[in-house]
């Protein structure tokens, strides 16, 4: 009987401890959207996997990390630009170095064809927003899909392990 009571007490303690253990929090990636705030014409050849000189890019997406663990990832996105609206979209990076599905007539990525997973929609300068996604291991691209921004160099990559 005493052994049985010890077992019941042990189970009760274990059960109460399981409620005290915090759930794993999402990994947070801080993303900055920025540009050189210039009236210069947007370059048209700075998209992912193109051979352009990226030092000439006038628009940028930067992340504070390039690798995160698989699972919930929260993107905290801030538009640090002075005069341009920007957004951030997350999609799986194309396999084999292929480009994202870009339509030169609209100067935009075809989001559905690219498999967009989520976004922080248009942010005015100085504003911020978040999106949380459940990401499996793989390679992803974070990009702005306002007219001409992606091809002006406004993208970066993220690896999920």
Image: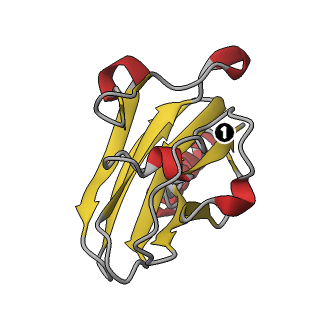
Residue 149 placement, left or right of 156: left
- Closer to the camera in the image, 47 or 5: 47
For residue 49, above or below residue 75: above
Where residue 80 appears, x then y in whole percent? 43, 79
Res. 102 image quadrant: top left
Res. 74 image quadrant: bottom left
How is the rendered protein coloured? Answer: secondary structure
Q: Which SS class for mark 1?
A: strand
Residue 4 placement, left or right of 72: right
Q: Residue at x 43, y 66 (%)?
A: 76
Q: Residue at x 34, y 40 (%)?
A: 118
Q: Residue at x 55, y 65 (%)?
A: 58
- Closer to the camera in the image, 57 or 113: 57
Where residue 92 appears, x then y in whole percent? 53, 28
- Closer to the camera in the image, 9 or 141: 141
> Which quadrant: the N terminus?
top right
For residue 44, above or below residue 42: above
Q: Residue at x 51, y 76 (%)?
A: 36
Where residue 57 appears, x then y in whole percent? 61, 59
For residue 71, above or below residue 78: above
- Closer to the camera in the image, 76 or 59: 59
Residue 72 in view, yes or no: no
Number of marks in the rendered image: 1
Q: Which residue is mark 1?
A: 160
Where residue 68 appears, x then y in whole percent? 67, 49
Q: Residues within 10 Å of mark 1 (few under 14, many from 20)?
A: some
> Which quadrant: the C terminus?
top right
Residue 68 in view, yes or no: yes
């Amino acid at each position: 009987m005493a052994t049985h009571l010890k077992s019941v007490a042990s189970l009760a303690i274990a059960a109460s401890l399981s409620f005290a253990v915090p759930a794993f929090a999402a990994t947070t990636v801080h993303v900055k959207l920025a540009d050189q705030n210039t009236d210069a014409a947007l370059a048209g050849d700075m998209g992912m996997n193109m051979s352009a000189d990226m030092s000439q890019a006038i628009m940028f997406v930067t992340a504070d990390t390039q690798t995160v663990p698989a699972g919930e990832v929260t993107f905290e996105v801030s538009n640090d630009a002075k005069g341009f609206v920007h957004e951030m979209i997350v999609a799986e990076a194309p396999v084999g170095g292929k480009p994202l599905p870009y339509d030169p007539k609209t100067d935009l990525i075809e989001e559905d064809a690219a498999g967009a997973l989520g976004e922080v929609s248009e942010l005015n300068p100085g504003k911020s927003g978040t999106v949380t996604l459940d990401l499996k291991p793989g390679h992803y691209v974070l990009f702005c899909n306002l007219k001409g921004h992606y091809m002006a160099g406004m993208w970066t990559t993220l690896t999920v392990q």
